[in-house]
Image: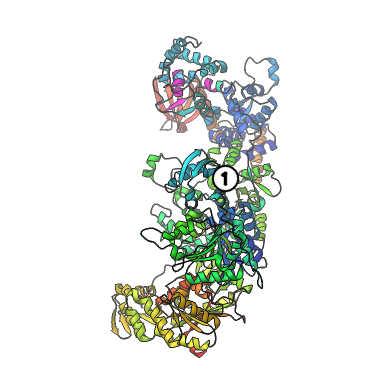
């Protein structure tokens, strides 16, 4: 028996014992083909999926290597059926190939005649194909490249895409590495991405995803389109690019609701692209009409459905997706992978934390007993109002005050879902409130003041969930959230993870009303972070005042 | 001279070693012991015994025996020598045939005989042989797969006889050089003559429609075949594209219709197709299958993985059965619904669940409780406490010895392909788990043989270091067909199943015989235990507690610890490691079972390799502190709580309407539902009621029937050879009797016991074949005996039909009433 760190389960999960001396080695060995699923403190769990195995094939790993790795590091015998399954799954990849034919343009080829016959009979695939050239070759409409690949993936015959990428218009971009250096994992992520062609890089909030984007742009040195979630994020990208690269103000354009500039590097918001007028997307031309060499999707987990469809047409361009939390409550993670590309880099949050690149965080769930009258009101309420009632309990406001008093002098965020509640808290704390109807200019001003330390406490709604860079924020108090959204919770914690100047740990409080829906949703929301190894301490409200 | 008497003499003259070898090869000859050599000879010639002996012959032996049977005649004592047989077996040598004939003689299946009349003097130096008389009945009507001759077919098939003359005439008209015939017998002889020449037949077949060769190939191993409308009208004059191969062959008499659906390829046609030899695929060495290969590492991984998985699943299965016994159907066996439930609990497919259930039951881990007709686990099952390697050996031993065939579960009840598709829905039955249909008395023997063949093939393949040959059902079957052609059919239905079962038990890994399997095949279980003991790690006594409220057991957990963890957490995952997830519900369950927070935490601290994480501690304490906040009572079934809000909340709860709740005081609700049900609903709402002594006075009677415990199975390989002591005793009896007999100067006691019956039957059957008269001493119902001279016609089911020439009538006599029988005339043909 060998004494490896892995335990391979017959349900296709792999457990990795973190404290084992070979753990790091084994993690690197299985990372190319297994998806990290959970990363609690002692046993990380990975899952083998067809998608993961095919991505491994695409990256040049064959079944034999996968089996070798499993057998080498496994502590117990590996279920034989799983080995066979891995082999069979991986052998399906590449039976179909997408190639450039000098005469016919994009074609699908195979050496396995029956597979082609099976595939072209699939109802959804038929319309994407052109005339058949010979038994083994069929023309593919080049605009359907993405969709075809996605559908082939769905029916289990993933195509190997050998048709390559368009070069895009060259535009020199260089990194401006004075006084800072690309961190090793950023370097690795960029290299992995570039070697793979297209794909998604998953890094925790605050770990410097923007820099991975910048490095990719420098490697590409072509005109680049960057898609981001909102205007504030667009400005942050611009600032960061100006600071870190050779790009100048004139070379970077903003394409948003307010400004419509197209420059060699253009930063557009998802929202403007998906604006629909008279049944048309007037701004989609931005994407199609220019010869971009690289497209970067920031917060790719938020990619709206129309962009999904549109992305299907962009298969000939290099695509980089960036995200911290690749979980979608609509379960479309798979589509992100199949349209943008496979996961090229993923690191458990705790690993990056251990390397000191993000601040350690202490998560605390504060359980609050509702006062009697509120409980009665909650008990009698309609189902639709129940969550709102318990999430906005007045006793929460009280606890917020206590917590703020406790963390006097620290940069503190109060985050919530319900505007009334936030307004009330803002009033009690004498703190500014940023919400949906706050103008971009006002937001920018408040964020700047917060960064500068002029304002210590900000009360924010979900507009601050993503992409807002507040390096010195070290305490966040979450009073309510959008139901059970896992990624919202993670993103909110993410606001605190920039390393602090004095190396302080971040503190994340989540206020939860006991015995109510609030508690159920909280448990759901915490799942992603729990899987990443963040353990919530649980505290009773009465202990907050005492401590 | 009677063949039995001749055999008796021959046996008597043998050395003790030769007799020992005979008893070893045909143990039924001395079970029960025989008193003397004539009885031994009689038994050796008996049909049943010959049949058993034939089952042990390998293919060349069988081929030689069948050929000898075809070229000799036991009635006329027309014998054959090795040289004679050689002409009929392509590719054989006299030396090889001599050896095989000698081995058959050792087995008392053939014996030495006089050369046939008219043999040249030079031929007298050769050894001549005759098969035992009953061989004819045992090999059946198609020895060596060849059909009957035209003359016999004409005699037995009136329809063909009627057509034969016309058929010959038609053939002549179409230009075939065949003798003219006026009677059916002449026609038969003409056809026989025509088809006996491979060249003439080849010439005729040259004009046959395409696919005829392919069709004839189907008759290569067996002379009879099924065709639709076998008695169709076919004529040589029919020409054209619509004449199929069957029509063509029927028209020329190359196939003879037997009935509406079957045809036969006559002897001479079959022989010519084989190029004039009876056997044309003679080979002294078994065919060597082409085997794939796998690595030794993969093989070991697969075998050990399978063992760990099987033991884990059997453990889970027993747990599930303890929770809820498996009900049986009235018709026997466990029904589909129960199987589905079991499969879901174990998270495996039904087929596998069926296999595991059968294996557990045959190992005695489950017992049928007759009173409740359900399968339960016997109390104090020793198996549960054994180390894993011994658990494994227990199961393997039980499997080897069992007459159950687990893999038959889920198969069609009438055997695969036994029922035509259209009727299958009607018959609709598949074999249920633990039902009587999955019983096969010869399973232990077949299993042993398969393991032996696997071992044999593995040895022969002599795979390079680090690799192992992959053995599949086809290779095993091919070998079985060579070593025991008469047994092969019994193998073919079980072989796949046995291989699957062996894989489940780790005897086969990655398609190759594992080291364990090889040790078991060599009947060396201690070696297997040793190997397994080295590779199966000992049970763990700790888990890893994590802040996400899980406990991970990184390997096989001691059963007692696992059992306790299951009370307070829910098991997840499927594989060597188990993940236990704690939730308010699971902790509540532990509290309900009488634990308290401190004992739970104490238990966790004791068995955790790491500190108990704060969230888990909080969960246990929080759940415990609120456990029992609500109290449910019996009187009218009440809910009482000091917490008015809770009561109010509950009263307004729409999901509790079914309880008919009414608030009788600020802190008390009553319910119309029984307390358990009420509590159930409250728990469903996320509340944590404690149930007061729910049904005072009502004691739920749990039957404490005595279910017998299970003893550890001991496997002894199925007997294939008799014990040495028995052989010695038998030999002593035989030799002593001879000594006595020689002392008394008397010949062997011919008229006594077994030998007499067998001799009488031999006389009778010979008389039937030769249409001779016999004189019989018959006892009538009054006990008077009288001597009769009759012509016997047939023997069947203990009765003999005779023709009485004196009265010119037919009669039926019971054989047991015949006390003596003698051929009335010594006719020689």
Q: Is residue A515 above or below residue B383?
A: below
Please state if B786 lies on the left or on the right of B578 as rendered. left
Observer-nearest residue: B428 or B144?
B428
Q: Which residue is mark 1?
A: B445
Coordinates of residue B697 in the picture (x, y in percent): 36, 77
Relative side of B427 to A224, left or right: left
Visible residue check, residue B41? yes
For the magenta stretch, what is the residue range?
B242-271
Task: List x then y, in percent, for residue A174.
Answer: 63, 64
Label 1 marks which chain's residue?
Answer: B
A96 w.r.t. A242: above or below: above
Instruction: Choose top left, top right, bottom left or bottom right for residue A251.
Output: bottom right
Q: Position of residue A545 (x, y in %)?
A: 49, 89
Q: Is residue B72 left or right of residue B643?
A: right
Residue B760 makes an appearance in the image: no
Query: As drawn, which residue projects farthest toward the front?
Result: A250
In the rendered structure, does residue B676 fall within the stretch colored magenta? no
Front residue of this view, candidates A156 and B331: A156
């Amino acid at each position: 028996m060998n004494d490896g760190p892995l335990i391979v389960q017959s349900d296709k999960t792999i457990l990795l014992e973190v404290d084992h001396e070979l753990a790091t080695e084994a993690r690197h060995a299985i990372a190319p083909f297994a998806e990290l699923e959970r990363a609690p403190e002692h046993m990380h769990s990975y899952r083998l999926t067809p998608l993961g195995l095919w991505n491994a094939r695409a990256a040049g790993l064959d079944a034999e290597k996968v089996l070798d790795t499993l057998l080498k590091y496994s502590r117990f015998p590996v279920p034989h059926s799983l080995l066979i399954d891995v082999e069979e799954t991986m052998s399906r990849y590449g039976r179909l190939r997408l190639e450039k034919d000098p005469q016919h343009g994009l074609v699908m080829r195979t050496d396995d005649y029956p597979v082609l016959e099976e595939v072209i009979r699939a109802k959804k695939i038929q319309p994407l194909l052109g005339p058949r050239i010979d038994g083994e070759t069929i023309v593919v409409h080049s605009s359907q490249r993405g969709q075809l690949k996605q559908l082939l993936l769905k029916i289990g015959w993933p195509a190997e895409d050998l048709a390559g990428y368009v070069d895009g218009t060259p535009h020199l971009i260089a990194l401006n590495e004075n006084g800072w250096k690309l961190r090793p994992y950023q370097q690795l992520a960029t290299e992995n991405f570039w070697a793979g062609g297209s794909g998604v890089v998953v890094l925790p909030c605050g770990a410097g995803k923007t820099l991975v984007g910048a490095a990719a742009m420098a490697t590409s040195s072509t005109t680049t389109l960057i898609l981001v979630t909102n205007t504030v994020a667009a400005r942050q990208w611009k600032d960061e690019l100006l600071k870190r690269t050779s790009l100048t103000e004139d070379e970077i354009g903003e394409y948003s609701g307010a400004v419509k500039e197209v420059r060699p590097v253009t930063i557009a918001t998802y929202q403007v692209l998906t604006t629909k007028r008279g049944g048309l997307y007037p701004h989609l031309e931005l994407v199609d009409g220019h010869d971009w060499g690289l497209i970067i999707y920031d917060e790719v987990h938020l990619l709206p459905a129309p962009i999904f469809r549109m992305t299907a047409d962009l298969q000939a361009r290099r695509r980089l997706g960036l995200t911290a939390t690749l979980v979608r409550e609509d379960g479309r993670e798979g589509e992100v992978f199949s349209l943008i590309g496979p996961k090229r880099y993923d690191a458990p949050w705790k690993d990056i934390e251990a390397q000191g690149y993000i601040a350690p965080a202490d998560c605390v769930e504060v359980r609050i007993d509702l006062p009697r009258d509120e409980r009665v009101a909650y008990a009698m309420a309609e189902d639709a109002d129940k969550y709102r009632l318990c999430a906005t309990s007045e006793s929460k406001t009280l606890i917020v005050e206590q917590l703020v008093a406790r963390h006097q002098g620290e940069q503190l965020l109060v985050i919530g879902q319900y505007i009334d509640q936030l307004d009330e808290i803002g009033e009690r704390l004498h703190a500014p409130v940023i919400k949906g109807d706050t103008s971009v200019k006002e937001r920018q001003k408040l964020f700047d003041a917060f960064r500068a330390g002029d304002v210590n406490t900000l009360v924010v709604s979900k507009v601050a969930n993503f992409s807002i860079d507040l390096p010195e924020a070290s305490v966040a108090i979450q009073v309510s959230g959008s139901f059970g959204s896992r990624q919202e919770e993670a993103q909110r914690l993410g606001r605190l993870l920039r390393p602090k100047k004095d190396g302080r740990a971040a503190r994340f409080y989540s206020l939860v009303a006991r015995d109510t829906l609030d508690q159920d949703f909280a448990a759901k929301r915490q799942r992603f972070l729990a899987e990443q190894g963040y353990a919530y301490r649980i505290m009773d409200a009465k202990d907050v005042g005492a401590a | 001279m009677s063949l039995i008497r001749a055999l008796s003499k021959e046996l008597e003259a043998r050395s003790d070693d030769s007799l020992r070898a005979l008893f070893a090869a045909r143990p039924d000859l001395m079970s029960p012991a025989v008193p003397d050599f004539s009885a031994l000879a009689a038994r050796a010639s008996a049909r049943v015994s010959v049949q058993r002996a034939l089952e042990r012959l390998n293919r060349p032996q069988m081929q030689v025996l069948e050929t000898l049977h075809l070229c000799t005649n036991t009635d006329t004592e027309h014998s054959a020598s090795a040289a004679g047989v050689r002409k009929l077996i392509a590719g054989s040598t006299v030396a090889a045939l001599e050896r095989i004939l000698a081995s058959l003689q050792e087995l008392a299946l053939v014996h030495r005989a006089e050369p046939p009349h008219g043999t040249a003097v030079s031929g007298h130096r050769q050894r001549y042989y005759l098969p035992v008389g009953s061989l004819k009945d045992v090999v059946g009507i198609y020895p060596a797969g060849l059909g009957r001759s035209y003359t016999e077919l004409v005699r037995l098939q009136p329809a063909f006889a009627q057509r034969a003359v016309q058929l010959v005439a038609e053939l002549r008209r179409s230009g075939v050089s065949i003798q003219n015939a006026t009677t059916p017998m002449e026609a038969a002889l003409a056809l026989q003559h025509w088809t006996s020449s491979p060249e003439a037949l080849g010439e005729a077949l040259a004009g046959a429609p395409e696919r005829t060769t392919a069709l004839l190939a189907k008759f290569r191993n067996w002379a009879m075949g099924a065709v639709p409308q076998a008695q169709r009208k076919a004529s040589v004059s029919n020409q054209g594209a619509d004449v199929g191969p069957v029509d063509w062959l029927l028209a020329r008499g190359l196939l003879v219709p037997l009935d509406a659906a079957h045809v036969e390829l006559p002897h001479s046609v079959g022989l010519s197709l084989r190029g004039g030899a009876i056997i044309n695929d003679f080979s002294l060495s078994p065919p060597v299958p082409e085997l794939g290969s796998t690595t030794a590492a993969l093989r070991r991984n697969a075998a050990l993985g399978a063992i760990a998985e099987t033991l884990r699943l059997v453990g889970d299965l027993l747990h599930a059965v303890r929770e809820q016994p498996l009900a049986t159907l009235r018709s026997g066996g466990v029904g589909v619904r129960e199987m589905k439930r079991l499969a879901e609990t174990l998270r495996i497919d039904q087929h596998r669940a069926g296999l595991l259930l059968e294996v557990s039951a045959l190992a005695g881990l489950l017992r049928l409780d007759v009173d409740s007709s359900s399968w339960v686990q016997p109390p104090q099952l020793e198996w549960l406490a054994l180390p894993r390697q011994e658990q494994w050996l227990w199961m393997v031993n039980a499997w080897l010895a069992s007459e159950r065939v687990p893999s038959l579960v889920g198969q069609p009840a009438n055997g695969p392909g036994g029922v035509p598709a259209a009727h299958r829905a009607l018959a609709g039955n598949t074999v249920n788990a633990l039902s009587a249909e999955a019983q096969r008395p010869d399973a232990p023997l077949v299993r042993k043989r398969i393991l032996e063949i696997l071992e044999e093939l593995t040895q022969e393949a002599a795979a390079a270091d680090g690799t192992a040959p992959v053995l599949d059902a086809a290779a095993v079957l091919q070998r079985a067909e060579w070593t025991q052609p008469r047994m092969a059919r019994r193998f073919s239905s079980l072989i796949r199943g046995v291989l699957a079962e062996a894989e489940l038990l780790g005897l086969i890994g990655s398609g190759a015989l594992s080291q364990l399997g090889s040790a078991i095949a060599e009947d060396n279980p201690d070696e297997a235990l040793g190997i397994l003991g080295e590779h199966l790690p000992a049970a763990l006594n700790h888990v890893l507690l994590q802040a996400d409220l899980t406990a991970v057991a990184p390997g096989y957990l001691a059963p007692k610890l696992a059992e306790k963890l299951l009370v307070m957490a829910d098991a997840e995952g499927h594989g060597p490691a188990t993940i236990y997830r704690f939730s308010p519900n699971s902790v509540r369950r532990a509290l309900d079972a009488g634990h308290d927070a401190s004992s739970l935490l104490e238990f966790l601290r004791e068995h955790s390799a790491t500190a108990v994480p704060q969230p888990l501690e909080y969960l246990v304490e929080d759940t415990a502190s609120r456990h029992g906040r609500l109290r449910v009572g019996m009187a009218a079934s009440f809910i009482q709580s000091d917490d008015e809000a809770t009561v109010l909340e509950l009263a307004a709860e729409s999901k509790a309407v079914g309880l008919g709740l009414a608030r009788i005081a600020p802190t008390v609700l009553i319910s119309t539902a029984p307390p358990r049900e009420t509590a159930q609903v409250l728990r469903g709402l996320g509340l944590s009621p404690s149930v007061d002594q729910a049904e005072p006075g009502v004691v739920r009677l749990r039957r404490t029937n005595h279910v017998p415990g299970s003893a550890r199975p001991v496997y002894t390989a199925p007997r294939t050879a008799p014990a040495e002591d028995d052989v010695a005793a038998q030999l002593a009896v035989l030799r002593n009797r001879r000594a006595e007999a020689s002392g008394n100067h008397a010949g062997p006691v011919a008229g006594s016991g077994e030998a007499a019956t067998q001799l009488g039957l031999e006389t009778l059957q010979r008389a039937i074949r030769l249409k001779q008269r016999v004189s019989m001493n018959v006892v009538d119902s009054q006990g008077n005996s009288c001597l009769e001279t009759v012509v016997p016609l047939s023997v069947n089911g203990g009765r003999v039909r005779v023709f009485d020439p004196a009265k010119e009538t037919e009669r039926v006599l019971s054989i047991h009433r015949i006390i003596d029988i003698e051929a009335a005339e010594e006719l020689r043909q």
